[in-house]
Image (spheres, rainbow, N blue to C red):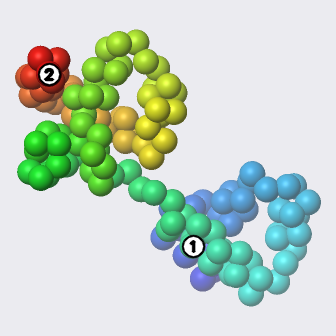
């Protein structure tokens, strides 16, 4: 069980049982009494799922994408556009529904970027309003 606990800790999961709390309580009870090899198989599966989940991307400037404007990394979604949408009164939930590839963490990164670079964002919004 120590090897399993160590792998869980490395993956940022408190325990295999915390990792599956959304599962049916009967399944959790079965996992708690399962032999360690089976627990390891379940852990491997959970780590596989975690690895496949999109990670927070951050913000990037790529010269060939959106004229080099700051975008959510790996997308063509400019930070200034998200900020303009927010200023128009869209909630985060509505923004996320309009941009299904984004996660809350992406918006948090965008809002942090806006706070750190207000002049750049204001200029981009102004330039794009003229179009």
- Residue annotated with mark 2: 131
- Residue annotated with mark 1: 48
Relative placement, left or right, of 91 versus 36 is left
Q: Looking at the image, which residue is at 14% across and 21% down?
A: 131
* Secondary structure at numbered mark 1: helix
Image quadrant in which you'd find residue 21: bottom right
Q: Position of residue 105 (x, y in %)?
A: 41, 41
Task: Answer yes or no: is residue 122 visible.
Answer: no
18 vs 89, nearest the viewer: 89
Between marks 1 and 2 in the image, the one whose residue lies nearer the viewer: 2
Task: Answer yes or no: is residue 88 visible.
Answer: yes
Relative placement, left or right, of 90 versus 22 is left
Q: Looking at the image, which residue is at 28% across and 20% down?
A: 84
Mark 2 burial class by Cα count in 10 Å: few <14, some 14-19, many 20+: few
Where 129 falls versus 101 (above or below)?
above
Where 66 falls versus 62 (above or below)?
above
Mark 1 burial class by Cα count in 10 Å: few <14, some 14-19, many 20+: few
Where 35 falls versus 112 (above or below)?
below
Q: Looking at the image, which residue is at 37% across and 35% down?
A: 107
Q: Looking at the image, which residue is at 40% across and 12% down?
A: 89
126 vs 11, nearest the viewer: 126
Image quadrant in which you'd find residue 3: bottom right
Q: Residue furthest front?
A: 131
Image quadrant in which you'd find residue 45: bottom right
Q: Position of residue 82 (x, y in %)?
A: 31, 29
């Amino acid at each position: 069980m120590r090897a399993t606990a160590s792998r869980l800790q490395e993956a940022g999961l408190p325990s295999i049982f915390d990792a599956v709390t959304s599962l049916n309580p009967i399944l959790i009870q079965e996992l708690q009494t399962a032999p360690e090899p089976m627990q390891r198989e379940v852990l491997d599966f959970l780590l596989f799922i975690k690895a496949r989940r999109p990670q927070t991307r951050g913000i990037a400037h790529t010269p060939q994408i959106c004229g080099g404007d700051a975008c959510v990394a790996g997308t063509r979604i400019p930070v200034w556009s998200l900020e303009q949408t927010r200023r128009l009164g869209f909630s985060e939930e509505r923004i996320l529904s309009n941009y299904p590839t984004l996660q809350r963490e992406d918006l948090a990164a965008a809002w942090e970027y806006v706070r750190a670079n207000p002049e750049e964002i204001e200029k981009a919004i102004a330039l794009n309003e003229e179009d």
